[in-house]
Image: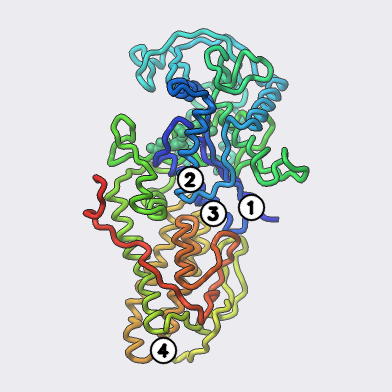
């Protein structure tokens, strides 16, 4: 039985136009989904949109549309961007889906029946644009501390989830499960918050007369449920009707709950680590394995905001620089979990150094030499490089055993130590790569790949294949070029989660027709000798700043 791997993104407010922040979270989840498919795991990758609440209702009214109609038109902004960014999501949930609403109502009823929900008088200062209540002490000059706008004094009845009863249990769970909240700094923040003050109960409803655009409470039709309660349940409801073999659709139900990773931004950590965790406890459902809160992007040192006019549109970045360069940059530039600063200069620098120079040149030089010296055919794999060793490390991407490259028994009088070094290097990165991916340490995983790329480039300098050609040392020349081509084939597999198109293009140029995508076990020597390469254009041409027409 394959391992199940269930990864989620936040569901995005349907009113927003997707920006680099949304793209960042979603690409991270895509990297994990693709990596897990490569490992042969059964993957469920969920994304979607958060469509209820006052803001959507208001925006729809301004456009003279029904809220659902407005949401339908906005959802396309996300779906189109995910197609453009090569996001391999398995399902797209919308909180307006009928089945989602049913699950939310079931959950509410269960909680009420168990005595986890209570009706109370609620009073406080309400900020209508933010849909949030504040206490007197929170206000800044009598205004909303978040957006600075006027607040209203409101007193009304509402339903509360008795979250406070779970405070001790939640602290214990976080303390006993070191990987529950990552990175560790965020885990400590949540623990600090939970230990320093009593946890309140959570208001989960709004009166329908004030906010009709939501899911009606099954036990009181005067009320709808409030956005966060509705939104968080998406991670669970999707497993009931959108996952492969979902339990509502088939008698052979596969239970996809709990999630392996909830990938979120640091701003929504409390809602996930505290609200969602305690809701699950109250429902007697298992908690997710991990909640990972990544950092925020600033733009050229400033907070990204509509008013500053510096919101980075991922569509524009992809149109100018290409999908894979953009995906690569986001995860190479900044350790996942920390804040980062985005600038087009930094992106161009990465493209020119890492992608055009280091990686692109390696591919293009290797293929040019195979074309020029070996009539465009992959040479035989030297026997010396292929000792029959049993496979190792089950479960990882790596493996080492005799491949089917077509063996060439060249005499041991040829000095192949440098070639063997590269082969060993390629094979040695596997445990480190898996370790980094397991910790969502994407920049370290990419570092490992680049160590190999740099060593392969150095091999070309060390062995100078053009001199081997001049000296008619064809055996050694073949050994060098086979090793370079085979290293590139394997590098493509490691790169695939980050740069799926590029990885496939590398294989195509090496003459391989198979698709990279699922259950690959890396075996040195699989590149077939005699196979015709298909050298194409340079994958990452250098970018001259003057060639960028948009203002930088
Ligand atoms: N609808 C809620 C989530 C509900 S999940 C049950 C929501 N939506 S959102 O549209 O505001 O999207 C939030 C996601 O985008 C968060 O993960 C947030 O951290 C991320 N980002 C928004 N701006 C960002 C940056 N400047 N940088 C990185 N990510 C940021 O919250």
> Residue 34 bears which disc, if any?
3
Residue 200 sits in which quadrant?
top right
Label 4 to label 2, Cα distance in Å?
A: 48 Å
Q: What is the x, y in percent for residue 152?
A: 43, 10
Residue at label 4? 474
First of labels 1, 2 by sequence position: 1
Q: Name above or below for residue 495 compared with residue 202.
A: below
Label 4 to label 3, Cα distance in Å?
A: 39 Å
State the residue at coordinates (69%, 32%): 284
First of labels 3, 1 by sequence position: 3
Looking at the image, can residue 201 be seen? no
Q: Are marks 4 and 3 in contact (CB under 8 Å)?
A: no
State the residue at coordinates (62%, 23%): 165
Label 3 to label 1, Cα distance in Å?
A: 11 Å
First of labels 4, 2 by sequence position: 2
Q: What is the x, y in percent for residue 173?
A: 60, 36
Residue at label 2? 82
Q: Is mark 1 within 8 Å of ligand 1?
A: no
Q: Nearer the viewer, mark 4 or mark 2?
A: 2
Foreground residue among 212 and 484:
212
Label 4 to label 1, Cα distance in Å?
A: 45 Å
First of labels 4, 1 by sequence position: 1
> Residue 42 bears which disc, if any?
1
């Amino acid at each position: 039985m394959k391992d199940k791997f269930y990864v989620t993104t936040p569901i995005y407010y349907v009113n927003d136009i997707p920006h680099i922040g949304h793209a960042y979270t979603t690409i991270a989840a895509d990297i994990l989904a693709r990596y897990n498919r490569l490992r042969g795991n059964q993957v469920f990758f969920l994304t979607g949109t958060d469509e209820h609440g006052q803001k959507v209702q208001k925006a729809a009214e301004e456009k003279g549309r029904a809220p659902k109609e407005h949401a339908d038109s906005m959802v396309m902004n996300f779906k189109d961007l995910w197609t453009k960014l090569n996001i391999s999501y398995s399902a797209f949930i919308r909180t307006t889906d009928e089945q989602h609403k049913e699950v939310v109502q079931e959950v509410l009823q269960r909680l009420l029946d168990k005595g986890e929900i209570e009706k109370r008088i609620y009073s406080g200062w309400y900020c209508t644009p933010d849909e949030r209540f504040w206490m007197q002490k929170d206000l800044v000059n009598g205004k909303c501390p978040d957006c600075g706008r006027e607040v209203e004094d409101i007193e009304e009845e509402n339903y509360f989830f008795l979250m406070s009863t779970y405070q001790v249990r939640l602290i214990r769970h976080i303390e006993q499960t070191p990987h529950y909240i990552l990175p560790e700094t965020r885990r400590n923040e949540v623990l600090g918050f939970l230990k320093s003050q009593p946890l309140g109960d959570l208001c989960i409803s709004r009166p329908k007369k004030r906010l009709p655009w939501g899911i009606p409470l099954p036990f009181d039709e005067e009320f709808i449920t409030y956005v966060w309660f509705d939104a968080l349940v998406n991670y669970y409801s999707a497993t009931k009707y959108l996952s492969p073999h979902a339990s509502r659709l088939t008698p052979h139900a596969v239970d996809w709950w709990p999630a392996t990773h909830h990938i979120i931004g640091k701003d929504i950590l409390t809602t996930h680590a505290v609200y969602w965790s305690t809701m699950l406890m109250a429902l007697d459902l298992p908690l997710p394995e991990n909640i990972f809160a990544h950092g925020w992007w600033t733009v050229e040192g400033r907070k990204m905001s509509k008013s500053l006019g510096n919101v980075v549109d991922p569509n524009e970045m992809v149109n100018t620089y290409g999908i894979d360069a953009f995906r690569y940059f986001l995860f190479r530039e900044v350790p996942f979990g920390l804040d980062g600063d985005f600038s087009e200069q930094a992106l161009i620098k990465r493209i020119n150094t890492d992608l055009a120079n280091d990686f692109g040149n390696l591919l293009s030089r290797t293929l040019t030499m195979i074309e020029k010296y070996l009539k465009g055919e992959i040479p035989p794999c030297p026997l010396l490089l292929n000792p029959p060793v049993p496979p190792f490390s089950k479960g990882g991407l790596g493996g080492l055993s005799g491949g089917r490259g077509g063996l060439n028994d060249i005499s041991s009088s040829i000095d192949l130590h440098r070639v063997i070094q590269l082969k060993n290097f390629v094979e040695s990165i596997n445990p480190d790569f898996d370790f980094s991916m397991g910790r969502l340490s994407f920049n370290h995983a990419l570092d490992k790949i680049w160590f190999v790329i740099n060593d392969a480039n150095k091999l070309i300098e060390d062995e100078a294949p053009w001199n081997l050609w001049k000296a008619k040392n064809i055996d050694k020349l073949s050994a060098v070029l086979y090793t370079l081509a085979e290293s590139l084939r394997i590098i493509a597999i490691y790169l695939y989660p980050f740069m799926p198109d590029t990885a496939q293009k590398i294989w195509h140029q090496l003459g391989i027709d198979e698709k990279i995508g699922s259950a690959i076990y890396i075996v040195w020597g699989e590149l077939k000798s005699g196979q015709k390469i298909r050298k194409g254009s340079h994958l990452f041409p250098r970018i001259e700043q003057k060639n960028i027409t948009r203002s930088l």
